[in-house]
Image (tube, rainbow, N blue to C red):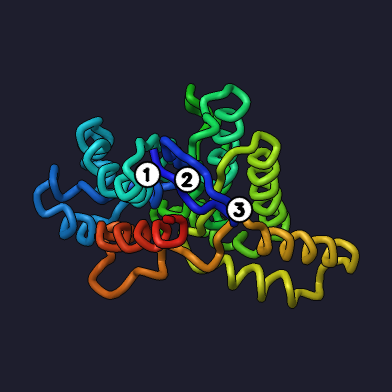
Amino acid sequence: MATIKYNNTLRVINRIVAYGCSYTFGSELADIDFIENAEAEKRNLGLAEFNRKYGHIITSPELIAKQQERVWPTLLANKLNVDVLNRAAGGTSLEPSVMTFRDDLFNKRIKKTDLVLLGITTLNRWLHIHPKKYNIINFVSSVIDENDPLHRAMVAVYDDFTLYTNHLTQLEHASTEALAHDSLFLGFPMTQDFKIMYTNKIGNNKSLEATYHNVLRMRTKRVMRNDHYKWDLDLTRFSTAGRLLGGNHWSTEVHEEFSNAIYQRIKL
């Protein structure tokens, strides 16, 4: 049990529940423990080929358990001396993270003494329905091989305002549900590009129809002012030379410093 500062109030928590993508799931943090010369292999093969070659290892319960010991939600939970449940998934987009959070709320898997953390994923990911797999939900992400035409398409739609509108909607949904259920909820961007998108792409774009542009700008400002989201504290703030792993995820040291920054923000 811990007492934290939560948006100008004091609240008691017993557990952290985390949602998000690979940065919150802990991808790569334990590869070196299970695969010899893992980092060199990734740089030599590329992450996509490395994952195909060692998929049976990197998806093993033993490796996942070890990597989640080193990821930022767990490190924060350790500092607060509370339990942790990591519901993140590597390669996922914001939409399924928020939907999983909302489903957990409605089915009462989240308790009043839980602190929910959302690692906010980049905009160039969306939910894709795979036409040939029995488990038809497939999360398309920007870590796909750059030679794959689908990856190039994802880069091309990065400035798509329909995609951006959906991104805003997911953030609004998460915040609204948290308020409705009196859930302790904080979201942190995993990268710095949100500030660039929010400020430059939306604020200065004159090609949109005027009314739509004004509404989008108003929604953007509202999300940026939302107390649930801590836009000034992103994971990449602590990314310095030598801390990048072979598949472009951040090292344990980055996760440690990020978790400590959050801890300093919420501790008594």
Q: Which of the marked residues, 2 or 3, is nearer the chain's N terminus?
A: 2
Binning the other alpha carbons within 10 Å of mark 1 as few (below 14), some (14 to 19) or many (20 upward) gives many
CB contact under 8 Å: marks 2 and 1: yes
CB contact under 8 Å: marks 3 and 1: no
Which residue is at 15% across, 50% downward?
A: 32
Q: What type is the residue that disc 1 sits on?
A: Phe
Spatial distance from mark 2 to mark 3, Cα to Cα?
15 Å
Q: Work out whether 70 lies above or below 206.
A: above
The answer to whether residue 228 is seen in the rendering is yes
Left or right of 21? Residue 112 is: right
Which residue is at 65% across, 64% downward?
A: 159
- Residue 228 bears which disc, if any? 3
Q: Work out whether 205 lies above or below 187.
A: below
Residues 82 and 92: in front is 82
Query: Which quadrant holds residue 89?
Result: top left
Q: What type is the residue that disc 2 sits on?
A: Gly
Which residue is at 26% across, 67% downward?
A: 243
Q: Work out whether 267 lies above or below 58.
A: below
> Among all residues in the image, which is located at the extreme left?
36
- Residue 25 bears which disc, if any? 1
Q: Secondary structure at mark 2?
A: loop
The answer to whether residue 27 is seen in the rendering is no
Q: Which of the marked residues, 2 or 1, is nearer the chain's N terminus?
A: 2
Q: Position of residue 259 (x, y in %)?
A: 36, 56
Spatial distance from mark 2 to mark 1, Cα to Cα?
7 Å
Binning the other alpha carbons within 10 Å of mark 2 as few (below 14), some (14 to 19) or many (20 upward) gives many
Query: Which quadrant holds residue 102?
Result: top right
- Residue 20 bears which disc, if any? 2
Spatial distance from mark 3 to mark 1, Cα to Cα?
21 Å
Left or right of 130? Residue 33 is: left
Q: Nearer the viewer, mark 2 or mark 3?
A: 3
